Image: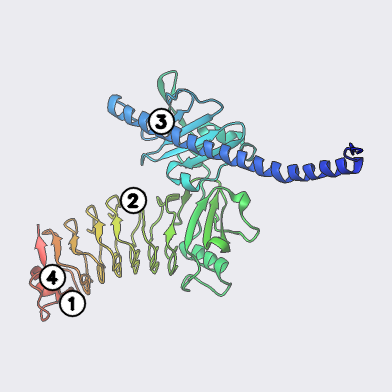
Amino acid sequence: MKKDNKGFTLVELLAVIVILAIIMLIAIPSVLNVMTTAKRQAFKEYIDKVALATQNKYTESQLYNNVTPSVVIYDIEKDLGLTSTGDYKGFTLVDSNKDIYVTLYDKEFAVSGLKWSDIDNASVVSVVSVSSTEFTKEGLATVVGVSDYSYYEDGELKTGEVILKKAIMTSGSVFNTYIKRLANDESFSASSADRKIKHVKFTRNISSAPDSKVSVSDVTSEKRIYVWWEESTETIYIGCENNMIYLSKDASYMFHYLFNVEDIDFSHFISDDTSSLYRFVSGCFKLKSVDLKHFNTSKVTNFRAVFLDCAEITSLDLSTWNTSNAIEIGYMFSGTTNLKSLDISNFNTSGVTRMENLFQKSGLKEIHIESFDTSKVKDMSYSFGQAPNLERIYVSSKFTIDAIANTSPLFTGSTKLQNFDSSKVSKEYWTLYMTVV
């Protein structure tokens, strides 16, 4: 029987080659994508490594050195004591709040002035997307927004400085109007109720912004600030090349009436020149937490209704706030129905004239306002009213009612107050419900 030893024909071989080529065209990008993703993840993990090393170095300096600068920059290769840095180069910065910022790059990837606490949302870009000037101590200081810093050179502590180009935000009400119109339509204003925005995030990656982005820079700003809306994630993005943005002198209404917003990134705001925080986040019913400890409020005169109706917030630490110039604080915590913890232990109210409805409808069980001086307060009406959980109010002898003109009830509806008597809820009976310490 004759065997058939016929091999592949030329056509069949060509077909096999074409099929293999197609398979390679499909497979190679996927393989390369996996490799790139792995390298990007390794890069982010190294950010963590240098940030931890920075934290340890700074802590050691505090423990063992007589001089600990408020802002210090470390060279990743020379100062951090890492066993091997490989291709990684860059600097880290510790600011006056002990926050850590990282500028890191290798042959492929880079971050510039990344705040360590933002690492989960970090945008790791191609190294060619970052200018060479950002890969310097001066570049890092500029991005973070510090003009004076210390650094180590040959074991000695030296000082450096940069001239900053400020990024200054437009007024709070204008900003509010812009973001509501981006998410909704042109009919919206600062007084309109937005129900679309769920997240407000900061980014330095302006190149990813859509053409519909809007400038929200003040006319005096040296750096541009933009906002844009991402429908798919229900997110408003605030974009700026600088890592820190100066709030306007009038930051009133900035995030007012964002009914469904759940989180706002406040960490990139500087409030050094701000004089009004009126209704700053009022009406943010679903905002779950607020971290404003870093705000410098020394120039703020109007704190009225800052947190009005922030019903989901459970804790507020405002112990670092300077209220020495405060005049109005009325409605400041009104409607914070789930508030369980509030630290306002350093509040200076010696210049305050109005504090009506201050804690009305709050969820607090105890109110500690031993620092309050109310000698100039003319209106204190309903300040502690309709607070169903309120049992004790702690004050000092500086809490007086001598200047009060409005005689409306102070405690009405707060039925858990010690010795509560529904027939005695006006100012004349405040000593029944307050513990003087």
| Amino acid type, callout 3 | Ala
User: In this figure, which residue is indicated by the disc labeled 2?
Assistant: 293
| Amino acid type, callout 1 | Thr
Disc 4, disc 2: CB below 8 Å?
A: no
Earlier in the chain: of badge 2 and badge 1, it is 2
Q: Nearer the viewer, mark 4 or mark 2?
A: 4
Q: Specify few, some or many for label 1: CA neighbours under 10 Å numbering under 14, 14-19, or 20 or more.
A: many
| Amino acid type, callout 4 | Leu
User: In this figure, which residue is indicated by the disc labeled 3?
Assistant: 53
Q: Is residue 420 visible?
A: yes
Q: Against 279, is 121 above or below? A: above
Residue 324 image position (x, y, % from top left): 27, 54
Earlier in the chain: of badge 1 and badge 4, it is 1
The Cα–Cα distance between marks 1 and 4, rounded to whole angstroms, is 10 Å
Q: Specify few, some or many for label 3: CA neighbours under 10 Å numbering under 14, 14-19, or 20 or more.
A: some
Earlier in the chain: of badge 3 and badge 4, it is 3
The Cα–Cα distance between marks 1 and 3, rounded to whole angstroms, is 55 Å
Disc 1, disc 3: CB below 8 Å?
A: no
Q: Is residue 54 left or right of residue 132?
A: left
Residue 155 image position (x, y, % from top left): 41, 19
Q: Nearer the viewer, mark 3 or mark 4?
A: 3
Q: Is residue 399 visible?
A: no
Residue 209 image position (x, y, % from top left): 61, 54
| Amino acid type, callout 2 | Lys
Q: Residue at x 49, y 65 (%)?
A: 197
User: In this figure, which residue is indicated by the disc labeled 1?
Assistant: 412
Q: Secondary structure at mark 3?
A: helix
Q: Secondary structure at mark 1?
A: loop
The Cα–Cα distance between marks 3 and 2, rounded to whole angstroms, is 25 Å
User: In this figure, which residue is indicated by the disc labeled 4?
Assistant: 417
